[in-house]
Amino acid sequence: MTLSELKISNDSRLEKVEERLSHLEENVTDTVKHEVNNAKSEIAESVKRDIAETVNAMVEQKMKELRDRQSRSMNLILFNVKQSGSPNPQERKRHDTSMVQELFKALVLEGDELQIRTCLRLVNKKNKDDNTIKLLKVILSSKEQRRSLLVNSKEASSLFDTDFKDIIVARDLTPEQRKTNKALTEEKKAKEKEGRRVSARHGEVVNTRDTPESTFQSN
């Protein structure tokens, strides 16, 4: 074989190799593109699922909070209500009910007898042997009476009866509301230490001159 023939043969073989490499490159590129597109689709679907699950969880949590607030809308929590020393549970309950009725009469001078569904003492689960006065949870039947007792409770300290003057009446807040109020209280104290005149209103701590009255989370 002459040099010319050898060159022609090699050139032909080289062209075939280059052609095969070109086809291989095209196939590899198409495969990579296909895999990339598949990955993009999978990621997009995964993100959509994650967003949907997150939104559903947030909605469910909000609905749960609203249901909890609604279930507490007729309740009040009373602090420092003197406890009965009777060993009889029914007698202790009658005592608590009577105390709440007498407090209502002393604070709300007009109106019917307080409509109480039930009264129960809240036990500290972390310390059941705690001898301090247990909180008294009162469930009422009238929203109007609940509002009247709550509004007039600030006058309890002026009552002459020593059994009533230390009583504090508060809303029955959800754990989320208590958490929010705690954070607001801490923020308010921190700003007051800075010499600022502030109050809490609608879930925010603002300058006192910007708001007529201080309010925390309520139901």
Image (spheres, rainbow, N blue to C red):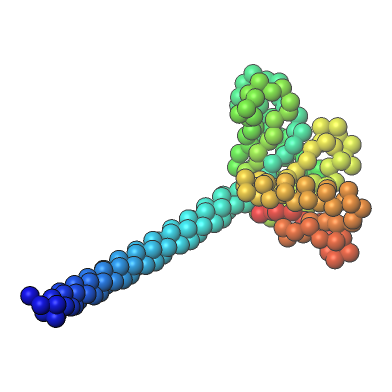
Residue 41 drawn at (x, y percent): 34, 67
- Which of the pair 45/162 is nearer the observer? 45
Q: Residue at x 83, y 49 (%)?
A: 190
Residue 183 drawn at (x, y percent): 72, 49
User: Residue pushed farthest front?
Assistant: 2
- Which of the pair 74/70 is nearer the observer? 70
Is residue 53 placed above or below 193 in the rendered structure? below
Left or right of 120, for residue 48:
left
Q: Quadrant of residue 13?
A: bottom left
- Which of the pair 84/187 is nearer the observer? 187
User: Residue pushed farthest left?
Assistant: 1
Is residue 127 placed above or below 113 in the rendered structure? above
Q: Quadrant of the C terminus?
A: bottom right
Residue 45 drawn at (x, y percent): 37, 65
* Residue 92 appears in the picture as rendered: yes
Q: Residue at x 88, y 48 (%)?
A: 193
